[in-house]
Amino acid sequence: NGTDEENVGKLTGDISGGLTSNESVLRRMKDASQVKNSNVSLPKSSLRKSRRTSSQKIPKDARSPAQAGRSGLQKYGQLANKARSLISIRTALPIWTHQTEIQRHLQEKDILLLVGETGSGKSTQVPQFLVNESWCRPQKVRIKTKGNTENVTVGGCIAITEPRRVAAISLARRVATEMGTPLGSASPASQVGYSVRFDNSTSPNTRIKFLTEGMLLQEMLRDPWLRQYSAVIVDEVHERGVNVDLVAGFVRNMVAGNKEGRGGIPLKVVIMSATADMNRLKDFYEDGFPSNTTKSSDSDPAVNRTYEESDREGDEDGYESPWSGLSSDNEDASAGGQLGEAPGGSTYSAGHVATCFIEGRQYPVVAIYTPEPVRDFVDASLRTIFQIHYGEPMPGDILVFLTGQDDIEALEKLIEEYAAGMGSEVPMHVQQRVFQPSPHPNMRKVILATNIAETSVTVSGVRYVVDCGKAKIKQFRTRLGLDSLLVKPISKSSALQRRGRAGRESTGKCYHLYTESEYSKLEPSSTPEILRCDVTHAVLTMKARGVDDIMSFPFLDSPPRESLEKALLQLFSLGALTESGSISHLGRQMAKLPLTPALARVLLTAAAPETDCLLEVIDIISCLSVENVFINLVNEDKKEEADVARKELLRREGDHLTLLNTVQKYSSENTDRRKWAEQHFVSHRAMQAVMDVRKQLLAQCHHQKLIPPPSELNTPSNTSPERATVILKCFLTAFANNTARLFPDGSYKTVIGNQTVAIHPASGLFGRKLEAIMYHEYVFTNRSYARGVSAVQMDWIEEALAR
Ligand code: CDP
């Protein structure tokens, strides 16, 4: 046990180890057949077995699934067996011995800060520790609003926020399995669900809901008091994306402010982190409380206490109560633990905010740096992977940190090519398959990931980590007035997190693809996103949630004043704010859409009767929400074939219309969509995601009364050039800043900021000379590229900018 820094031995060696050519890689592959047949045994696991305390029971649902009808009995039996089989794994997690302590803290206080290494069990166990606490039951209360008295149910459900959708979904699946309950919308009896953008999977009985931070913010717009929840758990706060900072600020107000809208029922808050600076967070939350009160829920005079004791019956949804089968007096679940039982020094109880540290379980990891700086990290990763595969005697999978889909796909292809030469199977990049064990002890699974695997997702079986030292980060470019994705060196803290992934289950090795001196120059930690990114969306969310004075919002780190002012201006120009800075009707509509303010504005413009191209715009936006609909071609042989096949889809107006054409053709294909996609070098998986997003956006637009129900819609199947102009003009109402004009020397320069930008090679307009272009994204790799490009006219841009 100990920190990464203490455990990590340092060894500097040549990781390319003379592997200078393809031939040597292939030679080593042949040599490796000996390694393959040798007997390798893992060192005896040193996992300690933790004590069982009286509160560590077999999950109730695993023993008696509440609503198993006759036909469902067998299925519930399987679920219960699976849940039982996981109990020994759960009880061995470092967090397990802190169960009573965590429960006790939240009986006494409304806010808990919990710090524990990745993999200690925070995300999966904490909601389960809390869900049966007595304060976590739904309560019927009477609330007075504007002279009326309303009967409402408050609480009963736990929200747990995640920075990324893949983590929210995979955690929900895991927790459902551990609790022996079906997942999400699969059954009305399901107690664990998730809600991520464009995918909501919950049931009327959901008690634990994993959501992305953005989805919780959306829910706050509909339900400002978060009445369905008894607790909000904010996970991965150290990631410090803009949304988690907003959630952190809003919950501070809710926990420390008056609880009028909740009928006096406190909202319990748990802030969890793998690395956060605990003192800072503690001060931030303590500062939220008025200085002369002890506990706001006890002493807040503003609370209209007309609420009654809960009648402890089920909700009005008609399903059996989630409490059936549970003893009504649940206090004994936590009474087993005695005060002070937790390991010394891990609790802190003065003030309003409780804190708890979970000791990590980390095996030593050897860090290896390159002797020379690496130029091409994809190539260096390839060599390192095969060097590990053949050179390392210990079994164990390899986790490779790259920067994004482009380099992941490029490396995947290269690995496949090399591995094809050795006739073995190669790992796959389908997200969920990374959680399955390697099929054979002599095989290694190679997981190609972005920084998502740093702390957000735990992949078991990993003993080797390859860290390219870079990540794609979003950064606001003042000259351009917009965010762009830049490949940048990671921070020391990220490097340590990446390294730590190799020591989760046994001793490991981490190959950093940079020199030790480069490492020493890395920033200690990454700058919070709110300090370096566009905050337009954040400001719109705050305005819609009733924060009039943005400058007074409790930010963990206040964004620079100019960036807030710029956001206010941008929202004003999008029509979301009035001249006095208050939110407009259009702004409220925009905030409710699960889109960036700019795309929301495009969509609402398209819905207006004078433009009337909403369905087409939804199709295009759905594609823009999914990374790469078209398959990147690494293999030159196929290029010609692909060019011919894609010609059918290309529209001369540019990528927006090409995407629309692709959706129209794909969705009208009624025989075999997979085959159609293959023939057109379109990613079938991406198109399935596009169709999902499209379905959700259609439903959302219907919900906001912009269109009739989706079942009554006739989606247009061919878009005329006249309509194409209308569509592009709709996009310009929000993207006039993302435009560039052609200069006599053949280069494009941005209309705002006069920066040189080139059309990305993946665009259908690559190499074309047009009067002006509008682009969806600005990316900077080795040069500045515009992606998602369409041809526009200067007078359209001027018209849009003049509005
Ligand atoms: O939140 P934290 O990183 O502290 O840990 P966790 O996500 O609760 O993970 C605890 C353990 O649960 C992991 O080590 C895995 O064994 C397991 N787990 C899993 O199998 N599948 C998931 N999607 C998440 C966790």
Image (spheres, rainbow, N blue to C red):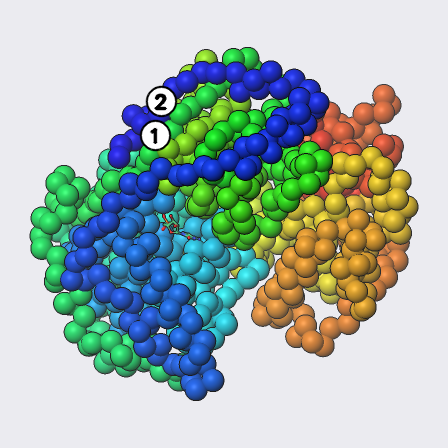
In the image, residue 155 lies at what x, y percent?
31, 68
The quadrant of the image that shows the N terminus is: top left
Q: Nearer the viewer, residue 450 or 616?
A: 450
Q: Element under label 2?
A: strand
Q: Does residue 543 lie above or below 447 as drawn?
A: below
Q: Residue at x 26, y 73 (%)?
A: 139
Is tag 1's residue or tag 2's residue first in the polypeptide sequence?
2
Q: Nearer the viewer, residue 368 or 198?
A: 368
Q: Residue at x 25, y 40 (%)?
A: 359
Q: Residue at x 53, y 20 (%)?
A: 15
Query: Relative to 639, is 201 on the left or the right?
Result: left
- Residue at image mark 1: 364
In the image, residue 610 lies at what x, y percent?
76, 62
Q: Does residue 167 lie above or below 453 as drawn?
A: below
Of the residues shown, which amino acid type is indicated by label 1?
Pro
**Do the residues under discs 1 and 2 have CB atoms within 8 angstroms?**
yes
> Looking at the rendering, which quadrant does residue 699 occupy?
bottom right
